[in-house]
Image (cartoon, grey):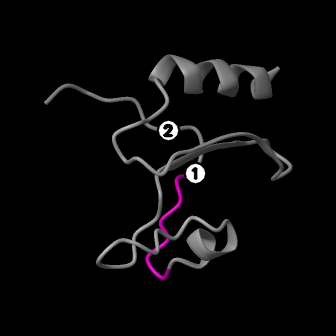
Amino acid sequence: MKDQPGFNFPLLSDADHKVIDRYGLLNEKASRPMPHPATYVIDRSGKVQWKFVEVDYKVRPSNDDVLTQVKKVEK
């Protein structure tokens, strides 16, 4: 396995789905508690600067789209 760079930002684990509930992402039609796919870019102060939420789990933002938004926050 190649060496992979680590992240320089935290990733969220939400096993008890408190954040899922807070952001209204719970998919009520799923057979078990599952969120709609969502990507958030949050600045250092904790403010959401960009979000992408989609009910179709097959639709996701591209890596380039996310990176573009992250770069805007880093400025």
Residue 68, placed above or below residue 45: above
Task: Estimate how packed mark 1 is, as few (under 14), some (14 to 19) or many (20 or more) residues with alpha carbons within 10 Å.
Answer: few
In percent of width and height, residue 70 lies at 67, 27
Q: Residue at x 31, y 29 (%)?
A: 4
Work out whether residue 63 or residue 45 is closer to the camera in this orientation and state it: 63
Three-letter residue code for mark 2: Phe
Q: Residue at x 49, y 38 (%)?
A: 7
Furthest residue to the left?
1
In percent of width and height, residue 17 lies at 52, 77
**In this rendering, position of residue 17 left or right of residue 9:** left
Q: Secondary structure at mark 1?
A: loop
Furthest residue to the front?
29
Q: Residue at x 47, y 51 (%)?
A: 55
Q: Residue 30 lies in what quarter of the image?
A: bottom left
Q: Quadrant of the C terminus?
A: top right
Task: Estimate how packed mark 2 is, as few (under 14), some (14 to 19) or many (20 or more) residues with alpha carbons within 10 Å.
Answer: few
Disc 1: which residue: 10
Q: Residue 20 lies in what quarter of the image?
A: bottom right
The circle on residue 32 is: none
Q: CA distance from mark 1 to mark 2?
A: 7 Å
Task: State if disc 2 and disc 1 touch (CB < 8 Å).
Answer: yes
In percent of width and height, residue 66 lies at 57, 27
Q: Residue at x 26, y 27 (%)?
A: 3
Find the magenta span and give its range.
10-16
Residue 21, placed above or below residue 6: below
Q: Quadrant of the N terminus?
A: top left
Work out whether residue 56 or residue 40 is closer to the camera in this orientation and state it: 56
The question of residue 64 being in magenta is answered with no
Disc 2: which residue: 7
Three-letter residue code for mark 1: Pro
Residue 42, placed above or below residue 28: above
